[in-house]
Image (cartoon, grey):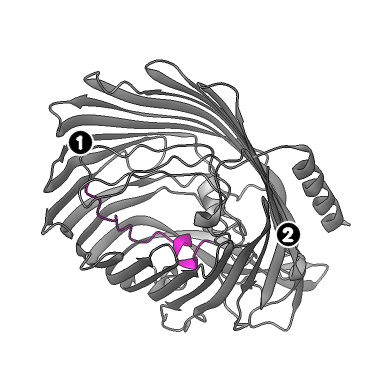
Amino acid sequence: MKRSIYIAGGITLATLMPFALQAQTQQTKDTTMTRTVVVEQEYNPNIMDASKVNVLPKVEEPAVVKKKAEYAVTPLPATTIPMGMMSPYLISKMQPNTTPGYIRAGYGNYGNLDVFANYLFRLSDKDKLNVRFQMDGMDGELDMPEEKLTWDAYYYRTRANIDYTHQFSRIDFNLAANFGLSNFNLAPYEPGKQKFTEGDFHIGLKSTDESYPVQFKAETNLMMYNRQNNNTLLFSDALGETQIHTKGVVSGTISDEQTINIGADIRNIFYTKDFKTEDLPVYEDRTTLALNPYYELNNDSWRLHIGANVDFSFGAGKTLRVSPDVTAQYVFSDSYVLYAQATGGKMVNDLRRLERISPYLLPLGTIHDTYEQLNATIGFKASPCTGLWLNLYGGYQDLKDDAFQMQQADEETVDGETAYYQFQDLGFTNSHNVYAGLKISYDYKDIFAFTIDGTYRNWDAKEEYALLLKPAYELKFDATLRPVKGLGIHLGYNYAGREEIKDLGKLSAINNLYAGAEYNVFKGVSVYARLNNLLNQEYQYYLGYPTEGFNFLGGLSFRF
């Protein structure tokens, strides 16, 4: 019944609302020294890699530009969770971007559901309204890891967005509203269900006249989040979070190649609680302030970014933390780049970020914000021939109050009978790692493209349990083939070996081989399919929670 209601509701909304992907801005031919970047907010169907659940090194790809890249920005689509859910793969370069409307619907085994729709209203030359709807989910039986239990699991996530932009002569004005709803159940040994509801309202301004010596971007967001916990063994209570999130940057031009900038990010976070037990955590209202002054130099040979992250916290946590914000890139022989960077900063563990870490968490202790004290990288990037890029890098990362999942066990005695149960809690520790990697990418005339990315990490943490889900080494392969017009074939592989923990062993490695295809049957009508976990492996993205075995999803997409 629950699945039928969700399917009917999703298809009805997708049918009634006209939507579309944004039109792609035509790019001039790139050169080594001048690269134009256009970001289109297409649906990103790829499942987030398991390694990205944890805080991992961020390696910035070197980019050599004389001028700052300009981006076309609309609301980002929601990331599909949980990680093991099925999503289609669509080849973005195949998709024409001249029509304002797009709608897609698909279904698969394990009750996998995919509904997506978008429409761009071009109200005038200066007014654009973008409307988006997305719903995905699953409903099927999963085998619990290391348990002889079958879990009748379901997870449905709905997202709706509306975004309006008006272009004044010197300023862009932007209004947006977003809504999200997640409904899912917990594992058999921690019975119950969860419902997360979120909504936010956004207003922003951005200067567009480059002839002025001072440029700015500013926005403020009212963000609301409600978490309804219904674990029948622990508690049944609601927790609400309200944020006023304001951020902006002001840039002053010294010359054609140099700028001085200062950025600020302020979060005021308030909680409303309705706990029925006294031993649950005290969620502290708090304010965070992040200042980011920096200097930039961009010329034919050098790209320098020199600054600092100064983070204040009022109400909870350490009051002041400082980390570097430095990047240096040097270009020689046209297509060879040496680069180094040292960055850091605060990652606020609000309820939205906790859901990304794991939606199944039931935190029973005080929540701290994670701070990246240092992430230092040195690397070399080269393009020895057209279409081929090599990137060799290594570095070190230091994290304070690194958040991690841990599985707790407890017991309860009622009328002389003892019941044992488990639940997912959240812990914090200091951790660090040394990493090294190599990335190779190649693109041949938009017919064949592939990327191979391998990374090794050596982790250490004060709490050894925190390393259980950390990837010790990763290998990613991704390839796209377009043999004939209108047909795209995709093949990929993701492998992540886990850290071995004394007295706990190690979890099974992530081992996912997947494939997908899309074919344009008629003008504006395409069929798509994706096969996931082709090797039918058993592994976990979230501690104690299984992923789907071999699964598939297919459907139709329309452009109008």
Tell me the tag on residue 449: none
Q: Please say if 517 is above or below 359.
A: below
- Name the image quarter holding the C terminus: top right
In what element is the residue under mark 2?
strand
Q: Which residue is mark 2?
A: 106
In the image, which residues are magenta? 48-64
Q: Residue at x 46, y 73 (%)?
A: 468
Along the line of sight, which residue is nearer the eye, 243 or 53? 53
Q: Is residue 281 left or right of residue 441?
A: right
Counting from the top left corner in percent of width and height, residue 395 is at 23, 64
Label 2: how many Cα within 10 Å (few below 14, some 14–19, many 20+):
many
Q: Is residue 314 left or right of residue 179?
A: left
Along the line of sight, which residue is nearer the eye, 456 or 67? 67
Q: Residue furthest right?
A: 1
Counting from the top left corner in percent of width and height, residue 279 is at 60, 51
Label 1: how many Cα within 10 Å (few below 14, some 14–19, many 20+):
some
The Cα–Cα distance between marks 1 and 2, rounded to whole angstroms, is 47 Å
Tell me the tag on residue 294: 1
In what element is the residue under mark 1?
strand
Q: Is residue 434 a member of the stretch shown in magenta?
A: no
The image quadrant that residue 127 belongs to is: top right
User: Nearer the viewer's eye, disc 1 or disc 2?
Assistant: 2
Q: Amino acid at mark 1?
A: Tyr
Counting from the top left corner in percent of width and height, residue 30 is at 29, 49
Counting from the top left corner in percent of width and height, residue 469 is at 47, 71
